[in-house]
Amino acid sequence: MHPQIQRREAFSIAGLTTRTCNEDERDPRSARIGKLWERFFDEARYEAPHRVNDMRLYGVYSGYESDADGKFDMTAGVAVMGDPATVRIEAGDYLVFSGQGPMPQMVLALWQSIWQYFEANPGVRRTYRSDFESYGGPDQVDIHIGVLTASES
């Protein structure tokens, strides 16, 4: 897997948020992210006011307690201009991992590959400020992981 690095400007997302952790997400009884997406679609939250001309859906990871083992906020949403933003994606450098295939299995497998990538590349350090999934279609996702630049290390 060879992720591409991209510099991103800050932007805002409006949607629904839950607080969870990876340990809870491994157990179907305590998993919250799938239920959050179901609610997002059931309530037609993709029709948000102030939505920008961007048809992608976003899954944003923010409010990290610590690292991949700690709690974090997950927001299912769309890009918006101005208020009422739910969460802001920070400007910075992101490693972009892309996947295509049946959901949600493909996204889960891509996250496994991302964790393996960081285990195999300890010199690449995550920021744990904002990461996001960008869904370009029903079977395509780009996962953006915030990383520290040489000047931030």
Image (cartoon, rainbow, N blue to C red):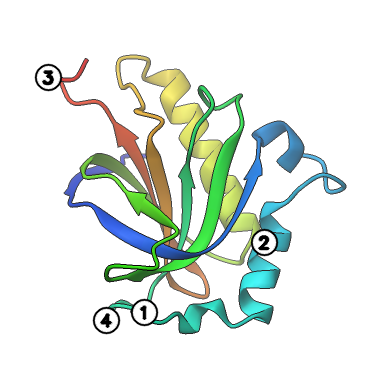
Amino acid identity at mark 2: Leu
Work out how far the residue at label 3 is from the one at label 1, CA to CA, in angstroms: 34 Å
Q: Mark 1 Cα within 10 Å, few/some/many (few <14, many 20+)?
A: few
Farthest residue toward the left?
A: 151
Amino acid identity at mark 3: Ser
Work out how far the residue at label 2 is from the one at label 3, CA to CA, in angstroms: 37 Å
Residue situated in front as seen by the camera: 120 or 71: 71
What residue is pinned by disc 1?
A: 55
What residue is pinned by disc 4?
A: 53
Amino acid identity at mark 4: Asn
Quadrant where the N terminus is found in the figure: top left
Work out how far the residue at label 4 is from the one at label 3, CA to CA, in angstroms: 34 Å
Residue situated in front as seen by the camera: 127 or 114: 127
Residue situated in front as seen by the camera: 119 or 70: 70
Among the two numbered marks 2 and 3 on one chain, the one whose residue lies closer to the N terminus: 2
Q: Residue at x 47, y 36 (%)?
A: 114
Q: Residue at x 12, y 19 (%)?
A: 151
Quadrant where the C terminus is found in the figure: top left
Among the two numbered marks 4 and 3 on one chain, the one whose residue lies closer to the N terminus: 4
Under tag 2, what secondary structure? Answer: helix
Amino acid identity at mark 1: Met
Under tag 4, what secondary structure? Answer: loop
Q: Residue at x 65, y 80 (%)?
A: 43
What residue is pinned by disc 2?
A: 36
Work out how far the residue at label 4 is from the one at label 2, CA to CA, in angstroms: 23 Å
Tell me where residue 94 appears, x and y as whole percent. 27, 41
Q: Residue at x 23, y 52 (%)?
A: 10
